[in-house]
Amino acid sequence: MAVVVLAMKETAPGERRVALTPETVRKLIAAGATVLAQRGLGDGAHFADAAYVEAGAQLVGDDALPQADVVLCVQAPPTDAIARLRPGAALVGILQPDAEPARADALRAHGILAFPLERLPRTTRAQAMDVLSSQAGMAGYKAVLIGAQLAPRFFPMLTTAAGTIRPSKVLVVGAGVAGLQAIATARRLGAQVEGFDVRPETREQIESLGARFLDLGVSAAGEGGYARALTDEERAEQQRRLAAHLAGIDVVVCTAAVPGRRAPTIIDADMVAGMRPGSVIVDLAAETGGNCAVTVPGQTVEVAGVTVAGPLDLASLGATHASEMYARNVQHFVSLLLVDGALAFDWTDELLARTVWPQVPATAPTSGAPA
């Protein structure tokens, strides 16, 4: 019997992305799966039910949840939906099971094989499945557009009959995927852009995008490409130099985040007070506490004349393209579970073994449908 893959309609407030697109429906069917899509699944991302049907999916309601061997989602479903899943079913998405005890308890109680894709090892082989990277790219792009909208200035240099308008100065803090996309987007809009990261090896990436690397004279180079912890003296010197530099910046985009941990506070209240009125801070890390001490998650506030935005779920603002990328990531991961059209769990594969939550089940099946 074919493996049944079901995509759930998202229920989180404001979430418009989907874990399945008509394109990935076709690929999953080609891999031997029967694909079910909840009615209205793609409405928020502008994928019509008719497109799913044309691609070969069957439209279903909530009553189909117990039929699924593999369930796809973006954000974790509510606990009552988890309770309706078949014991042993595989749940794939950005699940963050440790963030909510009730969710973790429901997954354990009902014997669900949870695959939180935020736990996926970030290896070369896993790049096609890396949801954190694909969604961070959209978030970085949208963050700069928010900054441009909130700023009381043009981003590009303009020469007009009324005189020359100097370009805005934009500083992007953090040179991960989101930060690099933010740098590229701000450059496309014509701003004068700088990038800052505690890892000196990011200089080449920042400069390759046409931005200037902001060197604060403190190196946090560590082993394996990770930053080491700064000493108290180093951190104080870094903060002093950053505070002085922020006084001349028009828009700051903060993107420094650590998966599974609170975001580091990089811009304190005194730094905000030292910025010139009309400046803007867009804090991409708002969902995990924020890189700015005065950020209010989900709100845009004004502090000492500086506008500070703490947008949430930024990737959802670009729901169509974000969904296309996310769905491809998910489809590539699910392909690891489908062997010759049957469901199989190869626990010697590090991508499965290190992603499954909470750990490889001692009695988990290695092949066939989940027990």
Image: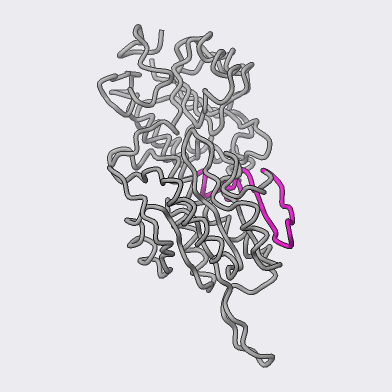
Residue 186 locus on image (x, y percent) = 52, 66
Is residue 48 shown left or right of residue 338? right
> Which residue appears farthest toward the left when viewing the image?
348
Number of disc labels: 0
Residue 302 covered by magenta stretch: yes
In this rendering, the answer to whether 144 lies above or below 34 is below
Q: Horizontally, is 294 left or right of 58 in the view?
A: right
> Measuring 67% from the left and 68% from the top, which residue is drawn there?
276
**Residue 227 rendering spot, x and y as whole percentages:** 37, 46
Q: Quadrant of the C terminus?
A: top left
Where is 177 relative to 89, above or below?
below
Q: Quadrant of residue 104?
A: top right
Specify whether 286 is left or right of 356. right
Find the magenta span and give its range.
297-323
Residue 169: in magenta span: no
The residue under the point 60% across, 31% down is 9
